[in-house]
Structure formats: structure tokens, C-alpha cells
Image (cartoon, grey):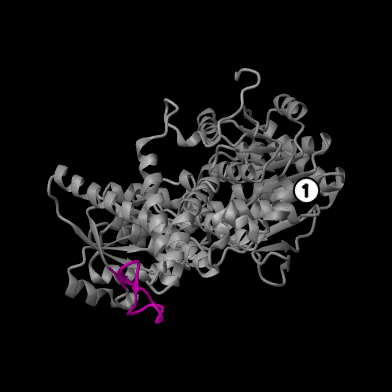
Amino acid sequence: MKPAGTVPVPHAHLRNRRGRLSFGLLAQFALDILVLSGVYVLSYNIRFEFSLSQSALRSMLLQLPCVVLWQWLCLLLCHAYRRMWRFTSLIDLPPFVTAFVASGAGMALFRLSVPGIARLVPVTGIPYSVVILSSLLGLGGVLALRVFRRSVFEWSARRRVLRETPSHAVSRVVLLGAGAAGVMVARELKNRADSDQKVIGFLDDDPAKQGTVIAGIPVMGPIRAIRELVDHNAVDEAIITLANAPRHKIARVVRHCRRAGIRSRIVPALYEIVNGHVAVGAIREVDIVDLLGRDVVTLEAESIRSFVRGRRVLVTGAGGSIGSELVRQVARFGPARLCMLDQSEWALYEINREMVGQSTGIPLRPVIADITNAERMEAVFAQERPEVVIHAAAYKHVPMMEANVREAVVNNIGGTLMTARLAGKHKANVFVMVSTDKAVNPTSVMGTTKRVAELVVQQQADDFPATRYVSVRFGNVLGSSGSVIPLFREQIKRGGPVTVTHPDMRRYFMTIPEASSLVLQSAALGKGGEIFVLDMGTPVKIDQLAREMIRLSGLQPDIDIPIRYTGLRPGEKMFEELSTREENVDKTKHPKIFVGKIAKADPKALQHGLKALRAAVEADDEAAMRAALSALVPEATLSSAAG
């Protein structure tokens, strides 16, 4: 603790550990004073056309120490000396501009003061032109001094690294995209003394940029000219710096690089770039997600913030692919408390460790619980009293659920019913269930159980009108656990074969962050009882997906890596449906979110069907469970037994 009466020392940040001003800072003070003195003398000479009279010379010499001291004090008071000179950049400009505007304004005010003061304060006689010139030249001088010192430091560091590092081959790099991200990468590679990459030029499709020089690097033509550039300039690598370009454009650029026979890498999206700085280590190989992921989703952040901020939030299935991303995104909007519930100890440990490491300041509670355990879930709701419940816990793997019908029914239907009822009982404001496109005209146990879960959630909206109940349907997410992309990666790593069910099979894909953000947006839009359907874009052929992943690995499909067709598995469809045609949905104010025109189940029929399903579960009769599911969802097409 500080002793009573202790007064903080002004500009304590300027001192070293012993409380003394560092030598480097003292040197900066001295250099600035020399520059400001020289600038003032130059300003006076410019004003009098380098022909100073005795009177003008005397005035200049009298004014010099006062003006220089005043300008230096303005720099100090505006915190210009907090900036490390070796890292000076445009972002550090404001305090310097403020200092010289303030110093010039001060001199001008003295100039306008009562003439009698001139005998005591010589600065009152400074010509206005000298005030302006000394301020402008002083600003330029102190900034030039810092840029010069930074350049010397970087040159010296580069020379030192070259002396200490064994000689190595330099990779010649072309940057594809001369926008903001491209300029950041170019500067980063140029400024790194230990970089083994030399940028020889940009390629950009903007005709206005072609033929110009950006950040000291020429823009050598459009991206399609990369093959000619490689042939004539011995290019070793291309870095794609189109940070927020549409994915179809990224795919086209990758094809150009492949045809040119050079390696291509990519920078992260602009939202991943921190403080306008691209770390060289963040430049990575092009991934299938870059080619399949869609354009950045625009969110109504304020509506989500008002929906989440200051509320107690419970996320079930918090350790899963979607659940963990929902946790990350909810945390960004400032909940009062965030409860993460999952039955997997390891998955819950991982997301809890990640969130604790972010030091968000949000109270976190990791809860290990099974959503089908009535006593445990009752205790969790009674203790946490969640105001927002996001239900992402479910069994989702289609073939696995065909072989484990009872668990699919108990977890996906029974667990959802349990959680939804507790949300209403404990007066939660909102309950949102993550559903799936496989609930549309289902052909699998998993899809049918999720459709019944939707019906159950709609029924709770009638039973607990104080709670808004909504469901959100979407298709496959890129890279989720159990999805096809991690499987293909593993098969390619093993040398194949890559197994595809059918050459014509198609699936919708969405990135995990996109799906999660749209779930939150839907929850904020919902009034109660809706089933929201997300716009999944254009379906992708799984065969083409597998071939593109093989090519991205630097191999050739059917030559280096064989592709084997295995046939549809039990419960699988050739094509998934989302019911986003106009006759099946209504638009919302968000372009990627629709409200399904889906009729609610008759309450008595739903209760009767659930009772029959419960009896089949208690008897552990799989055929009866399938029959009960078919009765609850007449549009379902289920076999009487697992295939």
C-alpha cells in the first residue's frame, strides 16, 4: 500500500527501475531540443529571406530558448515521449500533432497579448509566419528524427542477424492482393531482420493499382498473370492477401497458383488481425475452409448485445463444436454469468481453460451434467437461474444413432424436453434449441428425433408463455467433430483411400462461427414458437470436396490418393433439404435467417405419441421406438430396424 499522503509522480513512466530518467530518453530530449532550435532559426531565416537585420537577429536569439522550451513542454504534456521511437508509425502521429498545434496556438495568443508584456516576455513579438513555420517544420523535424532512428535501428538489427545467422536461401514471394492486408504483410516481411522471404511484387485485379508502387513494392499486373510472373521472375511462393474476399475468388486464386506450379499460403481474415499487424506466423496454408466457407456474416450486434448483456446464460453441450463457439460468442456480448454444461469432462475442461485464459472478467461456471438426469438438471437450474438457455447438446452422428436408437431418443428428445421444461419452470426469458436440416423429411433416427425435439420445444411455448422458445435449423458445419472434413484429412494423411459414399452426394456447409452467430441472431429475433431456418447457400458435392482437399495437400486425386465409393449408410440421404423455398418460409429482417412455415403438432397427439415412445424406451424395444417415431413424424421414412 502507498503511505498516506503519497502523491503520484508525474510522468513516472519515463523513469527506469531506479527512478532515474533513462539514457535513451535523455538523448531523445537533447536531440529534440537541437532539432527544435535548428527549426526555429531556419523559420526566422525563411521569414526574412536569409537576410536578418541586427534587430531581427537579437529578437530571434531572445525568443529561441523560450520557444524551444515551450514546444518541448507541449511534447512532454501531450505524452509524445511515451512512444518508443524504434516502433514509430502513423498510429503515433496524434500526440505530436496535438503538441505542435497547442504550442503554435500558445505563441499566437502571446503575440496577441498586451504590447507592454513584450518587455518581460520576448515571445510576444514573434511574427505570425514564424509561428506557423516553426510549428510545421518542428512537427516534421521531430517525426523525421524518430523515423531516422527507427531506420538505423532496423538496419543495424538486420545486419546483426545476418552476421549471426548461417546463410540460407531466400524465398522470392509475390503477394496476391494489394489492399490493406497486403500492405501489412509486405511491411512485416520487409521489417523482419530474420525473414527468409523477399517480396518481389504485388498482383492485384484493380486496374487503378496496376503499374503503381505500394509500400515500396511494384504492382506488377492482375492475379491471372501469376504464371507469366513465375516463368520470368523465378517466384517461389504466393501469399494470398485478400483478407475478406468472397470464397469463390479465393478458390479461383488458388487454381491460378496451382496452374503456375507454386505453393500458395493465405493471411487470416481481417477480424483476426490484431492492431493492424499481421504476424508472419499467422500466414498459413490454404485450407478447405477458405474455399467452402462463405462471405462474412453481418450481424445486428446491438440486438444480440441487448439480448445477452447482463443476463445469466446457460449453454448445454458447451464442449462440442457448436456449443464451444456459442460460449465464445456469448462471452463477447457481456453476460452477467456464463454456465457451461456438458457431460464430457475433457471437452468441458478444454473450453473452460480457454475462457479462463482470456481473462474476460465474466463469472464462469463449468458444470458436468447429463441433460437426461432430472435431479441433476433441476439442481443446476435452481442454482444458476439462467435467463437465457442455449440448448446445443445432442447426439448428431447419423449412422451411430441408427445403431443406438434408444440413446438417440432419450438424449435428443427426452433431454430436450427436460431442459425446455426446466427453462419454463425457472422463468428463463429465452430458450433456443440448435436443430438440423436432417429434421426435414427425415430418413434417419437422428433426424427424426430432432424433428420431435422441435415439436416438443414448440409445445413448451404454449405451456410456458413467459419464456420465448425458438429452434434454429442449419446443415453441416465445417470441421466439426464427426464431420467429413476431419475424416478426409486423416485418410489423406494415411495415404488413402478417401471414402466417399456416392459421387453425386451433396451437402450444405457453413463455418462454425457463422452458424453460431446466426443462432444468437435468431434467438434475438424470436418472439416465441418459431423454427428458424438458416440460408446455407449452395450445396457442395462431397466428391468434389474430397478431390479439392487432396489437391490442397499437394497430391493428385485418383493418382496419389485413390477415392473409393462406399454407398449410402443407414439413414443417409443423397441430398439434404432446408425448406428455404419461398412457399416454405417467411423472410425476417436478417437476409440469412428465415422463419419456417411449419405447423405445430396437435397437443393431444403429441402427448399420446410421446407416451408410446416412452413405453417403447422402457421396454427397450427398438422396433417399437422406430414405429413411435414414425407416428410422431408422419413425413419420416424409417426402416423397421437398423441396416
Residue 1 at what x, y percent from top left? 60, 18
Q: Nearer the viewer, residue 202 or 537?
A: 202
* Relative vertical location of residue 514 with respect to residue 253 in this rendering, above or below: above
Look at the image and tell me whether residue 631 can be seen. Answer: no
Which stretch appears magenta?
201-218
- Secondary structure of residue under mark 1: strand
Residue 455 at what x, y percent from top left? 75, 50
* Relative vertical location of residue 210 with respect to residue 356 in this rendering, above or below: below
Left or right of 257, for residue 163 = left
Q: Is residue 209 magenta?
A: yes
Residue 553 at what x, y percent from top left? 29, 56
Q: Residues within 10 Å of mark 1 (few under 14, many from 20)?
A: many
The residue under the point 66% across, 67% down is 591
* Relative vertical location of residue 290 with respect to residue 396 in this rendering, above or below: below
In terms of image quadrants, where is residue 547?
Answer: bottom left
Q: Nearer the viewer, residue 250 or 380?
A: 250
Q: Main secondary structure of the magenta part?
A: loop
Q: Nearer the viewer, residue 437 or 313?
A: 313
| Residue tagged 1 | 469
The residue under the point 74% across, 51% down is 470
Left or right of 94, for residue 5 = right
Q: Nearer the viewer, residue 23 or 431?
A: 23
The single residue placed furthest to the left in the displayed view is: 167
Residue 430 at what x, y percent from top left? 77, 45
In terms of image quadrants, where is residue 302?
Answer: bottom right
The single residue placed furthest to the bottom in the displayed view is: 207
Q: Is residue 311 magenta?
A: no
In terms of image quadrants, where is residue 618?
Answer: top right
Q: Amino acid at mark 1?
A: Tyr
Look at the image and tell me whether residue 340 can be seen. Answer: yes
Total labels: the figure holds 1
Left or right of 11, for residue 255 = left
